[in-house]
Image: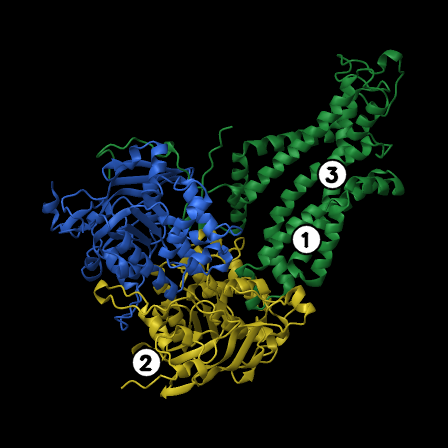
């Protein structure tokens, strides 16, 4: 990757930017007093359980799934805010899996994000190399009302990453870079926004400020965790278009994490659908939408509301909600909710296979479209 | 008491105009201060508290000019001067030594306020740091700190204070330090809980994602948001400290070289003010204490509301006055 | 749908005007809003946040924040004006005849009481049962109705998922067998699959119980899935209202059209999303003319000066826009 001085920025262009292989993250559940006494085996939440994917330079990929499927854990692990238990993360060809060893985010934050309870662990100062990675991988959070410090002005928020990385320079240089980031994020004229505080901004503007704060370090990968789900539908388009624009103009790769296939369909190149800590289907957006291979993808597609009453159709509503990732079902983990499950599904975990070129799924029944 | 009218923040109603964003940081600071002052100003009880405390401070600062007599100099005392009733010469009467109670009251304000402010400053420093560290870092150190806090919290303050003061000797500074050291637990607990909830907020996670370290996060994201709480709490701790100083002095553990309100009470109580019916010698310092404590409490509560407007209720109400005009067909204009 | 087509509508709102009077000025949250709701009908109330849709609904229940004032209009429920009732009569309307599922209310359950107990409490409070024991069969019935097995009634809210809490909230709203249920953003914080489950539930309850439902949402596609009629609000006023098909296939108001274009629509994936430039008007500083004029692409001189009144342009299709006055003649009554 880069030296400590950050001089050699990775080149932009075709090629693989991010490779994730067999990534696992478990959160052991507290055993409790009796459990410790009887030495009961520790149970764990299998938040992510062996996911692998590749992200090309300049590509926008969506990681789609319901809450509790592990998509936020994936994002935090990629950010180095959680440490993977197994598997590797390669960024630009370099193994960065354990760079984040020392900077685990506070447990309760993740618990709130994933609505699960986890063990406590101490947090320490990040290492220098992690800082280098941080400059190149930035994150946009779900809730623009929560991810800005209510007391900080827009300028302070956007300038903060530069200060943290010691790149602030003179006051004028800093102001110039902040101004440029704001304009890049679609807030112009930037002067209008510099000294505002979050409560003086609308939801869309706040999300743009968060994006500007991520852009100011000129990252090459942006991880966006539900970037629009808290926004009014009328504003969503502008944020999605902005992300798309950043890819086109600056070659930034975007990993977009969302529960809404409809949103993902609009601006991503590739979609990976997650269910219970695994990727169950992945392929080019158009292929996934036109010929979903996995029954879970089909169900997700069928429940997306279509803004046209003439196209009201039979929804394929799955009963219940994503099962508890502590006791995973035997065989295919989707089979208890699957409308087409067979006896085999309850026995054997389906292998990941490429059904048509670049379009893969983990389902016994997946067949290439006729 | 009819509730004072307070405006409520409405659900998002469009975006503030450009004007607000154009201001320079200094102007914005002034504006923010102005908004706190405005919110505070709406709270009449807070203004009353501020006035009460202000008056007490004014009296303490200007004591030499206000007090009709110098409490240090002792003139000739005749039997008539002892516990003399309030008169033109002695507006609040005299005490057992024939000295003017009003003058003692005015000078006593100095002692009580100095003890109150200094002790609560110590409490704030200890409580604030303990709370921040315990809340933000958590883990073993944080737990240890909170257990320590719990121990301080369960030990009855007064007996411990009496023991310590008896051991180290009752000088003014000893009393300040003892009160300060024993009075920080409340602040620590409040600050800790605030820090605990703040560190789980998404903007702290965002700071981590940027690559910020703990110290940066503490300085930029936790401390500024905890500060108003510390300030508010300090005002309330001042009143507690004054009460504690009065208690110690009343029990005869006050600094013998200075006469605080508690000391005045002690002298009056032990030297027969009650049996001689000299109520003024008891009521004057008592009212002084109540005055300052009440002022601090009112001010503290008002500050709490001004810093944290969310404390104001947002409850939906179903009142008849909601319908401003009886509905008539076609009554409204487009 | 009703047996007698000439019967008056269940709920007839005329010229509802609600303002917030604050030191920062008067906020014209709802201005001259009129609509009808038939028995068993499902009406979608659509608009961006801050457009007054929630305020309009709270006005119907006469539950406003303290600065809110209903300054004009009528809300006739079966011919009785809700704004003319005294507070005790109004209490007999709330929950018993019109109930509301508040936005985010699924997180409003008391965490230390079981869900069943809380519903039973509501039944006792509204005088539908003497004590909790007597309420129990009804609690089971209500939970059953929303797809929660009776046994789970004795569980605590934290043992419920978000979707289940929302179901329980709906059960609570149905406790007094109301005629009208107002659901304010009932699916906003939920995953798509859970959203579909909740919408399906609302549809089924409406069919089975003959409920009239007002669905308040910012999401046009949700409305397209479940509603019969749609009312689009902008800046506190009605922009357009008609049968659901008309809104999506023959939108007349420029705002409705822009709103539709801003929507991800899987049925036409080639279209690019176009957001609406600018921001909704500040309700304490409204433009003199049409409230949408500053953001409108088809704005005329007249739009900046004169407020358009809602007119029936096509049968059952009301639009408040100067561009659509062709059918105005039908409206001059």
| Nearer the observer, A283 or B82 | A283
Residue B293: percent from left, percent from top: 68, 33
Q: Does C198 appear above or below B180?
A: below
The residue carrying pointer 3 sits among few (fewer than 14), some (14 to 19) or many (20 or more) residues within 10 Å by Cα, namely: many
Relative to residue A50, is residue C287 depicted above or below? above
Q: Residue at x 32, y 78 (%)?
A: A286
Mark 3 or 2: the one toward you: 2
Structural distance between the alpha carbons of marks 1 and 2: 55 Å
Which residue is found at the position 47% from the left and 73% from the top? A276
Residue C70 in the image: state x and y as whole percent.
33, 37
SS at badge 1: helix
The outermost residue toward the left is: C329
Asked if residue A45 lies left or right of residue B248, the reply is left
Q: Colour of chain A?
A: yellow
Decide: marks 3, 2 in contact (CB < 8 A)?
Answer: no
Asked whether C254 or C37 is in front, the reply is C37
The answer as to whether the residues below labels 1 and 2 share one chain is no
Question: Which chain can be seen in green?
Answer: B
User: Could you tell me if residue C100 is visible in this image?
Assistant: yes
Residue C296 visible in the shown view: no
Share a chain, discs 3 and 2? no
Res. A13 image quadrant: bottom left
Determine which residue is flagged by label 3. B241
Of discs 1 and 2, which sits in the foreground?
2
Q: Which residue is mark 2?
A: A287
Horizontal relation, residue A31 to residue C308: left or right: right
Q: Colour of chain C?
A: blue
Instruction: Read off the residue under disc 1.
Output: B131
Chain on which label 3 sits: B
Return the x and y of residue A237 as percentages of the image width and height.
34, 64
């Amino acid at each position: 990757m880069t030296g400590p001085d950050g001089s050699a920025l990775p080149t932009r262009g075709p090629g693989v930017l991010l490779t994730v292989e067999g990534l696992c993250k478990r959160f052991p559940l507290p055993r409790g007093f009796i459990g410790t006494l009887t030495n009961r085996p520790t149970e764990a939440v299998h938040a992510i359980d062996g996911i692998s994917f590749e992200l090309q330079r300049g590509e926008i990929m969506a990681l789609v799934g319901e809450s509790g499927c592990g998509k936020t854990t994936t994002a935090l692990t990629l950010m180095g805010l959680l440490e993977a238990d197994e598997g590797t993360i390669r960024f630009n060809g370099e193994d960065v899996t354990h760079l984040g060893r020392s900077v685990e985010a506070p447990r309760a934050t993740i618990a709130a994000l994933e609505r699960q309870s986890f063990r406590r662990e101490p947090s320490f100062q990040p290492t220098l190399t992690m800082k280098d990675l941080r400059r190149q991988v930035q994150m946009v959070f779900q809730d623009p009302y929560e991810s800005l410090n209510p007391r900080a002005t827009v300028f302070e928020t956007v300038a903060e990453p530069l200060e943290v990385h010691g790149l602030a320079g003179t006051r004028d240089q800093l102001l110039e870079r902040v101004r440029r980031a704001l304009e890049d994020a679609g807030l112009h004229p930037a002067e209008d926004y510099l000294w505002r505080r979050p409560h003086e901004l609308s939801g869309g503007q706040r999300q743009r400020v968060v994006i500007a704060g991520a852009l100011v370090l000129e990252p090459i990968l942006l991880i966006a965790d539900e970037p629009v789900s808290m926004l009014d539908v009328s504003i969503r388009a502008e944020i999605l278009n902005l992300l798309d624009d950043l890819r086109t103009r600056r070659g930034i790769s975007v990993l977009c994490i969302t529960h809404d296939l409809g949103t993902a369909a609009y601006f991503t190149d590739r979609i990976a659908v997650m269910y219970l800590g695994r990727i169950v289907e992945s392929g080019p957006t158009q292929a996934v939408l036109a010929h979903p291979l996995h029954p879970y993808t089909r169900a997700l597609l069928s429940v997306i509301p279509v803004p046209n009453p003439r196209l009201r159709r039979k929804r394929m509503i799955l009963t219940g909600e994503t099962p508890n990732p502590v006791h995973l079902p035997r065989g295919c983990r989707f089979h208890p909710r699957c409308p087409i499950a067979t006896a085999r599904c309850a026995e054997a975990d389906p292998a990941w296979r490429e059904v048509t070129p670049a379009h893969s799924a983990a389902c016994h029944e997946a067949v290439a479209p006729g | 008491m009819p509730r004072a009218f307070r405006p409520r923040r409405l659900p998002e109603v469009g975006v503030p105009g450009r004007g607000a964003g154009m201001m320079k940081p200094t102007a914005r600071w002034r504006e923010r201060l102005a908004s706190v002052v405005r919110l505070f100003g709406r709270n009449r009880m807070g203004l009353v508290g501020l006035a009460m405390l202000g008056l007490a401070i004014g009296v303490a600062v200007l004591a030499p000019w206000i007090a009709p007599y110098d409490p240090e100099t002792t003139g000739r005392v005749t039997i008539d001067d002892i516990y003399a009733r309030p008169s033109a010469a002695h507006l609040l009467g005299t005490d057992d030594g024939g000295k003017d109670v009003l003058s003692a009251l005015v000078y006593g304000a100095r002692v009580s306020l100095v003890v109150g402010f200094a002790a609560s400053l110590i409490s704030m420093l200890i409580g604030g740091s303990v709370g921040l560290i315990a809340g933000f870092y958590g883990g073993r150190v944080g737990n240890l700190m909170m257990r320590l806090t719990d121990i301080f919290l369960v030990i009855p303050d007064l007996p411990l204070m009496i023991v310590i003061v008896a051991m180290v000797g009752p000088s003014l500074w000893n009393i300040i330090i003892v009160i300060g050291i024993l009075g920080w637990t409340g602040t620590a607990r409040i600050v800790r809980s605030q820090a605990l909830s703040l560190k789980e907020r998404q903007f702290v996670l965002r700071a981590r994602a940027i690559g910020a370290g703990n110290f940066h996060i503490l300085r930029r994201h936790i401390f500024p948001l905890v500060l108003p709480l510390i300030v508010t709490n300090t005002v309330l701790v001042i009143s507690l400290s004054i009460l504690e100083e009065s208690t110690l002095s009343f029990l005869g553990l006050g600094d013998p070289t200075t006469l605080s309100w508690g000391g005045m009470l002690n002298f009056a109580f032990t030297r027969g003010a009650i049996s001689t019916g000299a109520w003024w010698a008891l009521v004057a310092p008592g009212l002084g204490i109540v005055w300052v404590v009440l002022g601090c409490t009112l001010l503290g509560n008002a500050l709490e509301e001004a810093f944290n407007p969310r404390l104001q209720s947002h409850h939906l109400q179903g009142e008849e006055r909601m319908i401003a005009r009886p509905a008539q067909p076609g009554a409204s204009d487009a | 749908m009703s047996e007698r087509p000439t019967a008056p509508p269940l709920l007839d709102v005329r010229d509802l005007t609600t303002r917030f009077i604050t030191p920062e000025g008067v906020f014209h949250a709802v201005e001259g809003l009129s609509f009808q709701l038939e028995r068993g009908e499902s009406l979608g109330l659509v608009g961006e946040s801050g457009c007054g849709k929630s305020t309009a609904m709270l006005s119907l229940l006469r539950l406003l924040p303290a600065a809110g004032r209903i300054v004009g209009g009528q809300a006739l429920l079966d011919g009785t004006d809700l704004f003319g009732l005294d507070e005790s009569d109004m209490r007999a309307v709330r929950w018993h005849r019109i109930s509301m599922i508040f936005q985010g209310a699924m997180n409003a359950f008391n965490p230390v009481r079981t869900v069943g107990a809380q519903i039973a409490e509501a039944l006792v409070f509204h005088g539908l049962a003497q004590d909790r024991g007597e309420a129990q069969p009804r609690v089971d019935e209500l939970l059953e109705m929303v797809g929660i097995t009776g046994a789970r009634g004795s569980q605590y809210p934290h043992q419920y998922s978000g979707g289940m809490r929302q179901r329980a909230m709906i059960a609570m709203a149905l406790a007094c067998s109301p005629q009208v249920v107002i659901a304010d953003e009932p699916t906003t914080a939920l995953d798509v699959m859970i959203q579909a489950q909740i919408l399906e539930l609302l549809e089924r309850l409406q069919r089975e119980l003959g409920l009239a439902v007002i669905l308040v949402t910012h999401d046009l596609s949700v409305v397209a899935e479940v509603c019969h009629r749609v009312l689009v609000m902008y800046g506190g006023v009605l922009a357009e209202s008609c049968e659901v098909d008309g809104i999506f296939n023959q939108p007349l108001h420029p705002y409705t059209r822009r709103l539709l274009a801003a929507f991800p629509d899987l049925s036409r994936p080639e279209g690019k999303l176009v957001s609406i430039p600018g921001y909704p008007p500040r309700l304490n500083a409204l433009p003199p003319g049409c409230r949408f004029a500053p953001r409108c692409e088809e704005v005329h001189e007249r739009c900046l000066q004169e407020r358009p009144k809602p007119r029936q342009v096509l049968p059952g299709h009301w639009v408040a826009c100067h561009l659509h006055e062709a059918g105005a003649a039908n409206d001059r009554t």
